[in-house]
């Protein structure tokens, strides 16, 4: 234990000694993007692009950055919560939980080591201990110890930390937030984070080239959206609002291999900005443009054009049907904000160029509601109405019958299509080129 603690504080003491001697020689890492020695995987298109997503700024030093005090509320009794920054650019923070409920922290073996802030006194629990972390008066409580600004847990050597029984590779930071809850945050390297993401987004039993493509779009998403929750002390959440992340419990050898074999690779557009790597389960035969799905996406995006995809035909759930009574459909639409009476008729008013519904008209009483198709889908339920590609709407036996094809919004990479392409022998650069034309592979800066 003593040697382990010395290993942690020795680099800090050394850096403090050097800082007075060589401060003038400290320099920032280059923020340029190093393109891989591979061919550009698709032709460029000289069209307008959406506002670029700027890569994260370079880190000026590999040592810990001084704490930054952040006030998160205007009330005079608000606790000022310092947010410690990650030590390296390749390290990210993931918000695992936000809870008022006590959290249990343990380790797979050995002594559990923790401290209040970087550089403070190291504490330890008995071997095999499971610590119960509570929140009281906006302070983290562990036994008799109080931590106003949170507490860090460190894995020792090959040790793995567990939060509520789930294993995580990285350090764990538990801190109070301004909502009267605890944030449970994991800090770990980017590639190890992806080990727990890719198997939650794609089946580990699918072809290796498809999994490599999935690893790259997940890594690109991270780089494009890193820092989204910086005011709360982490980069991304672990749920569907970012990317679904399951920690070490979710890892599979096949997806880990896909991450390792594409290490550091991301997709960039023709202006060298990270691509918006949208993806979905099945396009139904043709992908969709984002401007026909989300109202905020009004600009034409050159690498997210609608493309034909015959490889998606291998999807066993390509076609779907569901039925709803007039009343159940009316209630679903009312909950979405459409106050209507008995529904008499439903028809598609406008189509997108790909063949999907754009506007759905719902006649109820003496009023016709013009509902965007994607909003109609989400109101009805995305598991029922799997896409906006409707091939038929009818009414019989007091029920509306909806028929369609595809699964998901249809934008970007089609996962079933990517699987079909991999099975046909395509490699991951070719797969990515098919769904994101005009992009190229590069390394994380």
Image: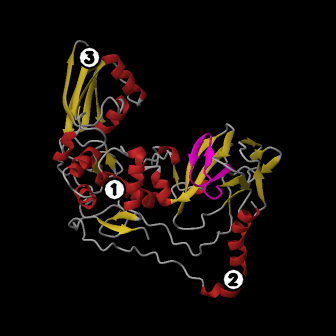
Task: From the viewer's perspective, tell me whether residue 362 is left or right of residue 28.
Answer: left
Residue 399 visible: yes
The location of residue 15, given as percent across then percent down, is: 68, 77
Q: Is residue 435 within the magenta segment?
A: no
Quarter of the C terminus within the rendering: bottom left
Task: From the viewer's perspective, tell me whether residue 87 is left or right of residue 254.
Answer: right
Circle 2 crowding by C-alpha within 10 Å: few under 14, some 14–19, many from 20? few
**What residue sits right under mark 2 in the picture?**
18
Disc 3 + disc 2, Cβ < 8 Å: no
Along the line of sight, which residue is nearer the eye, 194 or 174? 194
Along the line of sight, which residue is nearer the eye, 264 or 176? 264
Q: CA distance from mark 3 to mark 1?
A: 44 Å
Q: Earlier in the sequence, mark 3 or mark 2?
A: 2
Circle 1 crowding by C-alpha within 10 Å: few under 14, some 14–19, many from 20? many
**What residue sits right under mark 1 in the picture?**
212
Disc 3 + disc 1, Cβ < 8 Å: no
Task: Tell me the residue at 33%/44% (across/down).
Answer: 205
**What residue sits right under mark 3 in the picture?**
399
Q: Which residues are magenta?
A: 155-176
Residue 150 visible: no
């Amino acid at each position: 234990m003593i040697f382990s603690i010395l290993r942690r504080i020795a680099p800090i003491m050394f850096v403090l000694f050097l800082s007075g001697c060589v401060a003038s020689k400290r320099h920032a890492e280059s923020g340029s993007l190093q393109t891989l020695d591979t061919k550009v995987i698709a032709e460029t298109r000289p069209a307008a692009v959406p506002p670029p997503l700027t890569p994260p700024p370079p880190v000026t030093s590999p040592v810990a950055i001084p704490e930054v005090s952040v006030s998160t509320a205007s009330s005079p009794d608000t606790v000022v919560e310092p947010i410690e920054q990650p030590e390296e650019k390749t390290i990210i923070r993931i918000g695992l939980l936000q809870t008022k409920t006590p959290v249990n922290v343990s380790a797979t073996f050995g002594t559990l080591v923790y401290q209040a802030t970087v550089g403070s006194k190291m504490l330890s629990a008995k071997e095999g201990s499971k610590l119960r972390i509570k929140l009281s008066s906006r302070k983290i409580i562990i036994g008799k110890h109080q931590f106003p600004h949170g507490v860090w847990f460190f894995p020792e050597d090959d040790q793995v930390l567990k939060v509520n029984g789930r294993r995580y590779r990285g350090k764990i930071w538990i801190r109070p937030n301004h909502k009267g809850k605890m944030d449970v945050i994991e800090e770990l390297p980017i590639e190890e984070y992806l080990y727990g993401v890719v198997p939650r987004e794609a089946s580990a039993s699918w072809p290796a080239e498809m999994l490599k493509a999935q690893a790259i779009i997940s890594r690109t998403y991270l780089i494009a959206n890193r820092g989204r929750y910086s005011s709360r002390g982490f980069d991304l959440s672990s749920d569907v609002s970012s990317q679904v992340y399951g920690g070490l419990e979710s890892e599979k050898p096949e997806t880990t291999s896909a991450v390792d074999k594409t290490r550091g690779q991301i997709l960039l557009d023709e202006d060298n900005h990270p691509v918006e790597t949208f993806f979905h389960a099945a396009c139904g035969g043709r992908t969709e443009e984002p401007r026909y799905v989300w109202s905020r996406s009004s600009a034409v995006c050159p690498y997210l054009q609608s493309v034909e995809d015959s490889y998606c035909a291998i999807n066993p759930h390509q076609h779907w049907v569901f039925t709803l009574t007039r009343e159940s459909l009316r209630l679903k639409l009312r909950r979405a904000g459409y106050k209507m009476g008995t529904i008499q008729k439903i028809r598609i008013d406008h189509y997108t160029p790909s063949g999907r519904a754009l506007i759905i008209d719902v006649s109820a009483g003496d009023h016709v509601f013009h509902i965007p198709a994607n909003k109609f889908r989400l109101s009805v339920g995305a598991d029922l109405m799997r896409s906006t590609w409707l091939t038929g709407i009818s009414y019989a036996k007091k029920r509306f019958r909806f028929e369609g094809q595809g699964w998901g919004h249809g934008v970007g990479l089609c996962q079933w299509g990517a699987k079909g392409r991999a099975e046909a022998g395509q490699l991951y650069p070719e797969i990515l080129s098919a769904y994101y034309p005009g992009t190229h592979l590069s390394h994380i800066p």
